[in-house]
Image (cartoon, rainbow, N blue to C red):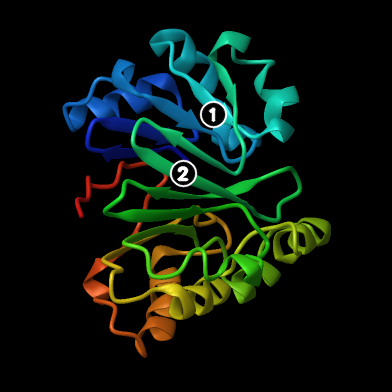
Amino acid sequence: NCTYINCGNTNIVIDVGITYNLVTKALKEIEFNPKDVDAVIITHTHSDHIKGLGTFVKKTNAQVYIMKSLIPEIKKIVPIQNINVIENEFSINDVNITLFNTSHDVPSYGIIINDGDKELVYVTDTGYINKKYWQLASNKDIYVIEANYNENMLMNGPYPYFLKQRVVGDSGHLSNHYTGMFLSRVIGERTKYILLAHLSEHNNTKEQAYKEIKEELETTKFDLNNLIITDQYEPTDLLEV
């Protein structure tokens, strides 16, 4: 749960759910200095999205951009001078960013990044995506979106009943089926890449996620060679559009 995005002279990181050492190692592999990050945007405050944030800010003095609802948790780990409280729409240099509400068991947000030429949608950790945002998220160049679980694997898996209900609920996560359905309705002619993220170790596999979402996208014009499954233990190759 850590994504690096470069838009010309602007460098953005979304979430820091891994250690500073892992972030640094991955960024140095693409010849980027973490101290040159212009902004860190946090989607929500679950530990798997912020556990490396405090050290990252301490080592790089990066500026963190959050919605007001995240202040109580973020100020525990980030100095107040590094916190920027933003509204749903804001800019970093010449990059325009829109946040929209997602549905999780803590305040959480999806992100649309627009550099004036290309646009990216980032959505993880939500039980569903409100239809009022579908048009906002339509026909973008890149989608980074969770495909967290397969329904049968979840229901027949090791999780206790209450946790299964949490995952499938409106404040839980997106299933492969839902993600495929959503993508089939919002991607367009501009869409070049789809990255599937946040796959459950217990309730999904890369093969299952790919199979289900491929089935939903076969009726679209999307090039399925550009449907990419991310790995929580290995950095994804740097993609360019």
* In the depicted structure, whether residue 141 falls above or below residue 104: below
Q: Position of residue 211 (x, y in %)?
A: 40, 78
Marks 1 and 2 close (CB-CB < 8 Å): yes
Q: Residue at 29%, 19% (x, y): give it.
A: 36
Left or right? Give the position of 43 relative to 94. right
For badge 2, the amino acid type reads Ile
For disc 1, the marked residue is: 65
Q: Whole-percent x and y of residue 29?
A: 19, 30
Coordinates of residue 188 in the picture (x, y in percent):
35, 76
- For image coordinates 81% across by 62% down, the residue present is 161
Residue 207: assigned label: none
List the residue tagged with mark 2: 97
Q: Residue at x 36, y 30 (%)?
A: 93
Q: Please identify, in this view, whether the residue under mark 1 or under mark 2 is nearer the observer.
A: 2
In what element is the residue under mark 1? Answer: strand
* Quarter occupied by residue 154: bottom right
- Earlier residue among tags 1 and 2: 1
28 displayed left or right of 72: left
